[in-house]
Every structure is written in structure tokens, then in C-alpha cells.
Image (cartoon, rainbow, N blue to C red):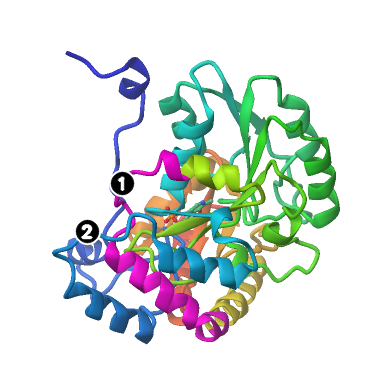
Amino acid sequence: MSPRPVVQALPAYRPGRNPADLAREIGVARAVKLASNEVAFPPLPAVVEAVTAAAGQTNRYPDNGAVVLTQALADRYGVDPAQVATGCGAVTLCQELAQAYNDPGTSIAFAWRSFEMYPLLAQVAGARAIQVPLVAGRPGGPADTHDLQGLCAALDDSTRLVFVCNPNNPTGTAVRRAELEQFLDAVPQQTLVVLDEAYREFVTDPAVPDGIELMRGRPNVAVLRTFSKAWGLAGLRVGYLVAEDPAVAEAVRRTHVPFSVSMLAQAAAVAALASEEVVRARCAAVVAERDRLTAALRDRGFDVADSQANFVWLPVGEEAAGLAAALEARAVITRPFAGEGVRVTVGTPEEDDVFLAALDDVRSATTVR
Ligand SMILES: *Cc1c(COP(=O)(O)O)cnc(C)c1O
């Protein structure tokens, strides 16, 4: 008895370092985790209240249609509830999209390097992954970003989905309105464009479009968003899809893993939406800290591009794994991409100062950059 070959070929799950374990292991009071792009703020007070109240009803199944949350999202974005689907995190919505649109032998296109989930979901769906390299950045200039023309040219009759991660994880770069509109105009109608906007709330460049506005009048466009990042609900698992064509949301609902958005997650998301002003203020603080961190890294000679997300990208190439290991030995957990770079989540000013001090220590101890 053996699993499907594509499943055997999947990488085994490797848990990230837990900061408490790391701190104990290296004998320091506290380790700093800047690896998963969470926000450092505690859950919103309204969220804690809503989750506490909902806890008393957890002997019951959640609402499988997430009716209250779906309506709240529809109101928030000025769309019909039929255009919205919720999921157990945006990653589950990615899987549900592939299940809804990809027969074996079809394909899924995306830029690379981008969100790690995309190649895996293609593999599990038995779909071919069409990977189009990012346009290489240049030192002192723009960082690696989407090659939208190349991505469009790579689509073929078999392509059911094309993901555009905007801003891109892990480079933090974003594509702007004119080039994205040109791309959407050129993509064939039988291919669904999925704008993955997990980091939308951190975008400050006015030329970077809001996908939900951009999708209007374009039935082959859908937008993915999540409560895990700006809204601070990573531990509860809830994300959503907004599609111009209700048939897209309906297809995702048909492949929905039943009851996978828990009662607590639904209650928390509704409460978070009602606290949007607090969330906006928190995002503004993250953005201010992102700018400070970016400047501090540039002062140290790192070639850091402007990020539109809540993380920064250090394109250190072959030094990535070594640098992350050296930082970890100094109680700072980052996210290395071997041979490419290190992604560092914007933390609190205190956390980022610990990171910068660790970085200085690494560089004075070695010849890393
Ligand atoms: C974090 C992230 C998501 C969402 O993750 P969930 O926690 O599953 O909602 C989606 N796309 C990208 C690019 C991300 O970085």
C-alpha cells in the first residue's frame, strides 16, 4: 500500500523553530520570531471577547456557509455575498480552487520565486506547474518582481489558474496598476487569474491597485485575502475569496472542506472586521517600522528593495542558509530560502533592534557580506 507518487514526492513537513524552545536551547531569556509574517500585536480585544463568547457553543458544528461572515465581507467590499467564499485560511482556498478547476493534465501558472504553496498544490492536483522566473532585480535598483508579460506568454490551452501574488511573498515587491491591467486584458477568458493579496493591507504605494476594484467587469478574476496577517488571526485560520463571477465563488464552495472554518474563526473574523480602525492603525505602525528597518539594513550595505508587505527581503544568495543559521544561534528566527535570500518579518521596534544587533554581531564574527 503506498500513497500516490506525487504525494510521495511532496517534501515532508518541517516545523519552524519555536522561539521558546530555541531560547531554552541557547540559554537566553527570549528568542525573537520574524519568520512567518504574523503581526506582533496581541489579538484585538473585540476578537478575544467574540472567541470567548463563541467558546460556549462549540459543542455545535459551525455554520458551514459562514453566512454572517460572508455578509460582513460583502458589505465591507461592496459585493454580493454570492461573490464571496470563505476558507480555512487562504491556503485552503488555493487548494479548493485547484480542486475546482484543475483536472489532471491541466496546468497552474505562477511566478517563481513566489508563495511556496503554489507548486505544491499543482503537484497534489496532478496539474503541471508553469513557473515563470521573476525579473531579476539589480543591486541598488528594483528587486526581483513579476514578469507579467512572460507569465502571460507562458499560459496555454491547458492553463486553468494563474496566481499573481501581489505584493509578492517573499520579495515584498508589487506590480502596479497599468501593467496588471494590461496582463488581465491579455489573459484568455478560460484561465482564472487569482490575485493573491495576503498582504494588501500593508500596501502604501498608490500605484499598486486594489484587486477587488480591478476585478470589476472581469469575470475571470478572483482575489484572495486572509485574516492571518494584518488582522492578526493566524492561529484561527480564516481567509476569503472575492470573485467577479459568482460562479467562481460557487465552485470553491462546492469543493469546500466541510466545516473547516471553525465557529471561533468565524466569530473572530466578524469581530475583527468591526475593529477595522484599530487594524488600520496597527498596519500604519508596521509600515513605519518597515521603513525604519529597511533604512537600517541599507545603512548596513544590504541591497533591500522597498517592500509593500510586512516583511523585508535580503537577497544574499548563497549566504542565505548560513546567515539564517547564524541569526538563529543569536536567538533570531528568520526564513531562509536557500541560495536566494532571507525573508525577515517586520516585528516590533524592540524585536527588530534585537535582529539588527544579531546581524551586526554575525557580520563582525564572519565575513558574511
Ligand atoms: C500568508 C499567506 C497566505 C495566507 O495564509 P493563510 O494563513 O492560509 O490565510 C496566502 N498567500 C500568501 C502569499 C501568504 O503569504
Which residue is depicted at the point 42% across and 69% down?
A: 68
Q: Which mark is residue 337?
A: none
Binning the other alpha carbons within 10 Å of mark 1 as few (below 14), some (14 to 19) or many (20 upward) gives some
Which sits in the foreground, 1 or 240?
Answer: 240
Binning the other alpha carbons within 10 Å of mark 2 as few (below 14), some (14 to 19) or many (20 upward) gives few
Q: Assess whether residue 256 is covered by the magenta stretch.
A: yes
**Quarter of the rendering containing residue 272:** bottom left
Q: Amino acid at mark 1?
A: Pro
Q: Position of residue 369 (x, y in %)?
A: 58, 53
Report the magenta residues as a range: 253-281
Left-right relation of 289 to 126 = right
* Dot 1 beta carbon under 8 Å from ligand 1: no
Which sits in the foreground, 22 or 326?
Answer: 22
Residue labelled with disc 1: 258
Mark 2 residue element: loop
* Dot 2 beta carbon under 8 Å from ligand 1: no
Which sits in the foreground, 229 or 261?
Answer: 261
Residue labelled with disc 2: 61
Mark 1 residue element: loop
Q: Position of residue 124 (x, y in %)?
A: 41, 27
Q: Amino acid at mark 2?
A: Tyr
Residue 267 visible to the viewer = yes
